[in-house]
Image: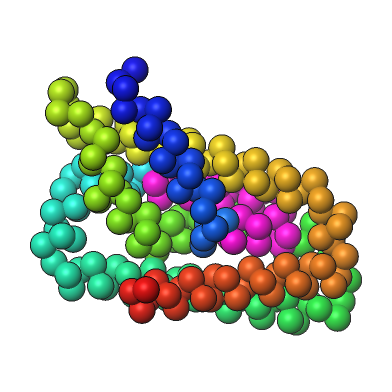
Protein backbone atom coordinates (compact mmCIF):
# COMPACT_ATOMS: atom_id res chain seq x y z
CA UNK A 1 0.00 0.00 0.00
CA UNK A 2 1.48 3.39 -0.97
CA UNK A 3 2.50 5.49 2.01
CA UNK A 4 0.12 8.29 1.01
CA UNK A 5 -3.01 6.14 1.42
CA UNK A 6 -3.24 6.33 5.24
CA UNK A 7 -2.97 10.13 5.03
CA UNK A 8 -5.66 10.18 2.37
CA UNK A 9 -7.96 8.07 4.57
CA UNK A 10 -7.37 10.40 7.53
CA UNK A 11 -8.04 13.47 5.37
CA UNK A 12 -11.30 12.14 3.91
CA UNK A 13 -12.49 10.97 7.33
CA UNK A 14 -11.91 14.40 8.84
CA UNK A 15 -13.65 15.96 5.85
CA UNK A 16 -16.68 13.69 6.35
CA UNK A 17 -16.79 14.47 10.08
CA UNK A 18 -16.99 18.22 9.48
CA UNK A 19 -20.56 19.54 9.84
CA UNK A 20 -22.00 20.17 6.43
CA UNK A 21 -24.76 19.51 3.95
CA UNK A 22 -24.25 15.73 3.79
CA UNK A 23 -24.41 15.30 7.56
CA UNK A 24 -27.52 17.45 7.79
CA UNK A 25 -29.11 15.46 4.96
CA UNK A 26 -28.33 12.11 6.60
CA UNK A 27 -29.87 13.21 9.89
CA UNK A 28 -32.90 14.49 8.01
CA UNK A 29 -33.34 11.11 6.32
CA UNK A 30 -33.06 9.23 9.61
CA UNK A 31 -35.79 11.39 11.11
CA UNK A 32 -38.11 11.56 8.10
CA UNK A 33 -37.26 9.07 5.40
CA UNK A 34 -36.97 5.58 6.85
CA UNK A 35 -34.26 2.97 6.33
CA UNK A 36 -34.78 2.39 2.59
CA UNK A 37 -34.57 6.11 1.91
CA UNK A 38 -31.49 6.40 4.11
CA UNK A 39 -29.73 3.52 2.32
CA UNK A 40 -30.54 5.15 -1.01
CA UNK A 41 -29.16 8.46 0.22
CA UNK A 42 -25.93 6.79 1.36
CA UNK A 43 -25.57 5.08 -2.02
CA UNK A 44 -26.31 8.29 -3.93
CA UNK A 45 -23.83 10.26 -1.85
CA UNK A 46 -21.14 7.62 -2.45
CA UNK A 47 -21.87 7.67 -6.19
CA UNK A 48 -21.34 11.42 -6.15
CA UNK A 49 -17.83 10.96 -4.76
CA UNK A 50 -17.07 8.44 -7.51
CA UNK A 51 -18.34 10.81 -10.20
CA UNK A 52 -16.33 13.72 -8.80
CA UNK A 53 -13.12 11.68 -8.71
CA UNK A 54 -13.72 10.28 -12.20
CA UNK A 55 -14.36 13.78 -13.53
CA UNK A 56 -11.18 15.00 -11.86
CA UNK A 57 -9.25 12.13 -13.43
CA UNK A 58 -10.72 13.01 -16.83
CA UNK A 59 -9.53 16.62 -16.63
CA UNK A 60 -12.30 18.54 -14.87
CA UNK A 61 -9.65 20.11 -12.65
CA UNK A 62 -8.09 21.90 -15.60
CA UNK A 63 -11.47 23.08 -16.90
CA UNK A 64 -12.60 24.60 -13.59
CA UNK A 65 -9.24 26.17 -12.86
CA UNK A 66 -9.18 27.73 -16.34
CA UNK A 67 -12.80 28.95 -16.26
CA UNK A 68 -13.98 30.96 -13.25
CA UNK A 69 -17.38 31.21 -14.94
CA UNK A 70 -17.79 27.42 -15.02
CA UNK A 71 -16.90 27.17 -11.37
CA UNK A 72 -19.30 30.01 -10.47
CA UNK A 73 -22.15 28.25 -12.30
CA UNK A 74 -21.35 25.02 -10.46
CA UNK A 75 -21.19 26.83 -7.12
CA UNK A 76 -24.48 28.68 -7.59
CA UNK A 77 -26.31 25.56 -8.79
CA UNK A 78 -25.03 23.66 -5.78
CA UNK A 79 -26.16 26.39 -3.42
CA UNK A 80 -29.65 26.37 -4.93
CA UNK A 81 -29.92 22.58 -4.46
CA UNK A 82 -28.98 22.89 -0.78
CA UNK A 83 -31.39 25.79 -0.21
CA UNK A 84 -34.25 23.82 -1.78
CA UNK A 85 -33.54 20.92 0.57
CA UNK A 86 -33.46 23.33 3.51
CA UNK A 87 -36.78 24.94 2.56
CA UNK A 88 -38.42 21.53 2.10
CA UNK A 89 -37.14 20.36 5.48
CA UNK A 90 -38.43 23.50 7.22
CA UNK A 91 -41.78 23.24 5.48
CA UNK A 92 -42.16 19.60 6.51
CA UNK A 93 -41.17 20.39 10.09
CA UNK A 94 -43.58 23.31 10.43
CA UNK A 95 -46.54 21.60 8.77
CA UNK A 96 -46.22 18.49 10.94
CA UNK A 97 -45.32 20.20 14.22
CA UNK A 98 -48.84 19.97 15.55
CA UNK A 99 -49.27 16.28 14.73
CA UNK A 100 -47.74 13.10 16.08
CA UNK A 101 -45.17 11.99 13.51
CA UNK A 102 -46.22 8.84 11.62
CA UNK A 103 -44.40 5.61 12.33
CA UNK A 104 -41.24 5.49 10.22
CA UNK A 105 -41.59 9.09 9.08
CA UNK A 106 -42.03 10.34 5.54
CA UNK A 107 -40.82 7.68 3.13
CA UNK A 108 -39.63 8.26 -0.41
CA UNK A 109 -37.99 4.89 -1.01
CA UNK A 110 -34.52 3.89 -2.15
CA UNK A 111 -34.72 5.63 -5.53
CA UNK A 112 -35.87 8.93 -4.05
CA UNK A 113 -33.15 8.78 -1.41
CA UNK A 114 -30.55 7.91 -4.03
CA UNK A 115 -31.42 10.90 -6.19
CA UNK A 116 -31.43 13.20 -3.16
CA UNK A 117 -28.02 11.95 -1.99
CA UNK A 118 -26.55 12.16 -5.48
CA UNK A 119 -27.87 15.65 -6.23
CA UNK A 120 -26.73 16.95 -2.85
CA UNK A 121 -23.23 15.60 -3.37
CA UNK A 122 -22.91 16.81 -6.96
CA UNK A 123 -24.36 20.16 -5.94
CA UNK A 124 -21.79 20.65 -3.19
CA UNK A 125 -18.83 22.63 -4.56
CA UNK A 126 -16.78 21.70 -1.49
CA UNK A 127 -16.73 18.10 -2.70
CA UNK A 128 -15.81 19.37 -6.15
CA UNK A 129 -13.01 21.54 -4.82
CA UNK A 130 -11.57 18.58 -2.91
CA UNK A 131 -11.81 16.37 -5.99
CA UNK A 132 -10.19 18.78 -8.40
CA UNK A 133 -7.55 20.36 -6.16
CA UNK A 134 -6.76 18.10 -3.19
CA UNK A 135 -7.38 14.61 -4.54
CA UNK A 136 -4.75 14.87 -7.31
CA UNK A 137 -2.11 15.65 -4.66
CA UNK A 138 -2.44 12.08 -3.37
CA UNK A 139 -2.01 10.49 -6.79
CA UNK A 140 1.45 9.07 -7.36
CA UNK A 141 3.25 9.71 -10.62
CA UNK A 142 3.95 6.00 -10.98
CA UNK A 143 1.51 3.83 -12.88
CA UNK A 144 -1.78 4.84 -14.47
CA UNK A 145 -2.85 8.23 -13.14
CA UNK A 146 -6.48 7.87 -14.26
CA UNK A 147 -6.98 4.52 -12.53
CA UNK A 148 -5.14 5.71 -9.43
CA UNK A 149 -7.41 8.76 -9.17
CA UNK A 150 -10.56 6.67 -9.58
CA UNK A 151 -9.28 4.18 -6.99
CA UNK A 152 -8.79 7.00 -4.52
CA UNK A 153 -12.33 8.12 -5.33
CA UNK A 154 -13.61 4.66 -4.39
CA UNK A 155 -11.68 4.87 -1.12
CA UNK A 156 -13.07 8.37 -0.51
CA UNK A 157 -16.62 7.07 -1.01
CA UNK A 158 -16.07 4.09 1.33
CA UNK A 159 -14.55 6.20 4.12
CA UNK A 160 -17.34 8.78 3.93
CA UNK A 161 -20.06 6.14 3.77
CA UNK A 162 -18.59 4.39 6.82
CA UNK A 163 -18.69 7.59 8.84
CA UNK A 164 -22.25 8.44 7.79
CA UNK A 165 -23.38 4.90 8.64
CA UNK A 166 -21.97 5.27 12.16
CA UNK A 167 -23.51 8.71 12.51
CA UNK A 168 -26.96 7.63 11.38
CA UNK A 169 -26.77 4.49 13.54
CA UNK A 170 -26.13 6.68 16.59
CA UNK A 171 -29.02 8.98 15.68
CA UNK A 172 -31.25 5.97 15.05
CA UNK A 173 -30.40 4.49 18.45
CA UNK A 174 -31.71 7.66 20.03
CA UNK A 175 -34.83 7.67 17.89
CA UNK A 176 -37.16 7.24 20.89
CA UNK A 177 -35.82 10.53 22.21
CA UNK A 178 -35.78 12.41 18.93
CA UNK A 179 -39.26 11.12 18.07
CA UNK A 180 -40.69 13.29 20.83
CA UNK A 181 -42.67 15.96 18.93
CA UNK A 182 -40.82 18.93 20.44
CA UNK A 183 -37.37 17.35 20.01
CA UNK A 184 -38.20 16.22 16.48
CA UNK A 185 -39.40 19.71 15.59
CA UNK A 186 -36.24 21.29 17.01
CA UNK A 187 -33.93 18.90 15.14
CA UNK A 188 -35.85 19.24 11.89
CA UNK A 189 -35.88 23.04 12.09
CA UNK A 190 -32.16 23.09 12.95
CA UNK A 191 -31.39 20.76 10.04
CA UNK A 192 -33.45 22.88 7.67
CA UNK A 193 -31.77 26.10 8.79
CA UNK A 194 -28.32 24.49 8.42
CA UNK A 195 -29.09 23.32 4.88
CA UNK A 196 -30.57 26.70 3.97
CA UNK A 197 -27.60 28.59 5.46
CA UNK A 198 -25.05 26.32 3.79
CA UNK A 199 -26.80 26.73 0.46
CA UNK A 200 -26.78 30.51 0.75
CA UNK A 201 -23.12 30.53 1.77
CA UNK A 202 -22.13 28.23 -1.10
CA UNK A 203 -24.09 30.26 -3.67
CA UNK A 204 -22.52 33.49 -2.36
CA UNK A 205 -19.03 31.97 -2.51
CA UNK A 206 -18.42 32.33 1.24
Could you tell me which residue is drawn at 20 percent across and 34 percent down? 146
Picture quarter containing residue 8?
Answer: top left
Could you tell me which residue is drawn at 25 percent across and 51 percent down? 132
In this view of the protein, can residue 55 be seen by the observer? Answer: no
Number of numbered labels in the structure image: 0
Magenta stretch, residue numbers: 24-49
Horizontal side of residue 193 vs 203, given as left or right: right
Task: Look at the image and tell me in which quarter the N terminus lies.
Answer: top left
Residue 88 position in % (x across, y down): 60, 76
Picture quarter containing residue 103?
Answer: bottom right
Judging depth in this view, the residue of 62 and 116 nearest the camera is 62
Q: Please, which residue is most extreme toward the top here?
A: 1
- Does 38 sit above or below residue 178? above
Judging depth in this view, the residue of 55 and 6 nearest the camera is 6
- Does 110 sit above or below residue 150? below
Residue 182 position in % (x across, y down): 85, 72
Q: Is residue 194 magenta?
A: no
In this view of the protein, can residue 75 be seen by the observer? Answer: yes
- Does 150 sit above or below residue 170? above
Residue 19 position in % (x across, y down): 54, 58
Q: How is the image coloured?
A: rainbow
Name the chief secondary structure element in magenta.
helix
Could you tell me which residue is drawn at 65 percent across and 46 percent down? 167
Q: Please, which residue is most extreme toward the left here?
A: 66
Could you tell me which residue is drawn at 87 percent across and 76 percent down? 99
Q: Is residue 37 magenta?
A: yes
Horizontal side of residue 163 vs 171, given as left or right: left
Residue 166 position in % (x across, y down): 65, 41
Amino acid sequence: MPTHVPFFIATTLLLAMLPGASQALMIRQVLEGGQRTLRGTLAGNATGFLLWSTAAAAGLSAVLLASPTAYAVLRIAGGIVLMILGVNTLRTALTTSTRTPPEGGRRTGFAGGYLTGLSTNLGNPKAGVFAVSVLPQFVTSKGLVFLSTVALGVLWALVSASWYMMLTWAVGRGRDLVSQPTVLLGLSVTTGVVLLGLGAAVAAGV
